[in-house]
Every structure is written in C-alpha cells, then in structure tokens.
Image: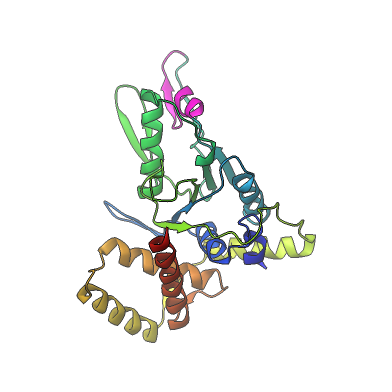
Amino acid sequence: ALIRHLSGPLGGDVLAAEYVLAVVVSRVHTRTDSLALGKLSLTLMGVPEGGDLPRNLAAAIADIAPCVAHLPLSIAGLNARSWTPKKDYGVNRLRSGPLQLAPGTVCVLDETALTSGQLKETGVRNVHALKQLVQLQELEYDFQYHQMRMPADLPSVVTSSAKHGDSVVQGCDCRVPLRMVKDTRAADPLDPVLAKTMRAFVARAWGSDHSIGDEASSEIESAMVAARQGERKATELEFHRWLTIARLCALSSGETELTVKHWKHAMECERKTEERLRLV
C-alpha cells in the first residue's frame, strides 16, 4: 500500500517509489569523522519541467511521514537569503533558514523550478550547503566571524529535470532515472484507518534498530569480496550504500533483521537502476 501510494505521483514508477520509501524511513544511526551512516539521499532524474510531480510527491510523503518540506530551488530564492542559520548581530539573534528543520523532516528539493540565471555569492553558498547536507548530513551555522558545523538528519529527495547527472545538488547517494508509465497525479485520499496504520508503520520503521543475520552476513561478505575483485572494483562508499539500502529494505518490509532476501532485493534494485543509467 505504501509503494502504491508513493508511485501515483511518480507516474506509476514502482522502482522509484521503493527508493523514495527507503529515504522516508532512513535516519543517521552512527557518525564517523567523514560519514553519516544510515542516511540516504536520492536524485530522481528526468522529472518533467514545470509539472506538479514534486508537489504531488511531497504531499504523498506528508500523508505518511510526520514532517515534510517542499523546497523549490529557484535562482531568485537561492540568491535572496541564507538557507542555513545566520547570526544577526544587529538584533543579537540567530536567524533561521529554510534548512533549519526538525530531525527526520523529509526534504523534497525541487530543481525543476530552476531557470537560467546567475547565482550570486549567497546562492553559491546555499548550493554548497545543500551538497553538504545530502553528503554529510551537516549544516554550517554562520556566526559571521566563524562557522560552526552542526549535525542534521534530513532525508532528501532531489527532483531534477536533468537526464545525465548534471544536477545542481550534487552528491546524493542514489540516482534513479524516472520511468513514468502514466501522468503524475496527486495521491488518492487515504482511508483514515489505513492512513493511521501507514503512519505508525513508517514511524516504527524510522525508529527501529536493525541486526544482520548470520546467513545474510556470510552472503554480504562474499558479495563484497567478489565486487572488490571484479572488473570495476566497488568503492567503500558503494559498500556503505548497498548495506544501507538493504537495511532500509528490511525496515520498509516491517522487519528489523536484514536477511539474504532483503540483500538480494536491494541488489536487484541497484541492478535495475544501473540498467536505467546506462540507457540514459
């Protein structure tokens, strides 16, 4: 039901809906110096320009998640003000920005609103802040005389008209070319009982810890060894992404133990995505 609900705004693209659901239930569970483990960000490529898909998708996510922010990325909007918090010494207070959001807020970053134009210094800083957010889940607070990086946990979906990876917000974990089989539409209104069940399911999945079964651990280890020895050697970041997607496949199925079934499903999703990327 969740996948069907999310696939409506995506023109019936079930694969894209699976990735969006994975983003919705993702959260940072461990931080290292250079990685925020558990987070997932997604770029949907080939989204029709000037359409309602980003707005419809944000509304569909809002039906099942506690907090959603639909943020159109226009040249004027990016140049107008800082998107991260900035200290105003004139009134001695920290002014908030559009990216200062509650942990767990799903951000739909709408690049289809972009038109030709030139980014000024503020706009360039805002694009850098968006990149830092999707890559590291950090926001840089501007105190004028110094900057302070603060941890964030804002799962993000970028909707981009680009078809060849030249998205403005660079660095998302996954890139999925959209394959619409019908026109985008607003998600159908949910039955109140079903809506309550779906919200509870998503909240439980988002807050759950996970474990890896012995059989799955052995399967994953063998797959990663083979990937390192393959013609195109997989990178450490790819390993982290595969594990994260497999974990989120388990959680979005209502299970907390990552099994071989979830691992194989995650790798099949990745295979389908790679196939789409080759055909772009």
- The residue that appears at 42% across and 56% down in the rendered structure is 175
Work out which quarter of the rendered image holds the N terminus and state it: bottom right
Residue 89 included in the magenta stretch of the image: yes
Residue 212 position, x and y percent, is: 40, 77
Q: Is residue 54 above or below residue 181?
A: above
Work out which quarter of the rendered image holds the C terminus and state it: bottom left
Give the side of residue 108 with respect to residue 59, left or right. Answer: left
Residue 3 position, x and y percent, is: 62, 66
Q: Is residue 138 visible?
A: no
Colour scheme of this structure image?
Answer: rainbow
Q: Is residue 11 above or below residue 70?
A: below
Quadrant of residue 123 in the image? Answer: top left
Q: Which residues are magenta?
A: 75-90
Residue 162 position, x and y percent, is: 45, 46
- Quick one: which residue is furthest to the front in this view? 279
Tell me how many marks there are: 0
Q: Is residue 26 visible?
A: yes
Residue 88 included in the magenta stretch of the image: yes
Quadrant of residue 219 in the image? Answer: bottom left
Residue 7 position, x and y percent, is: 62, 61
- The residue that appears at 42% across and 77% down in the rendered structure is 263
Seen from the viewer's position, the closer of residues 236 and 30 is 236
- Quick one: which residue is furthest to the top in this view? 90
Quadrant of residue 271 in the image? Answer: bottom left
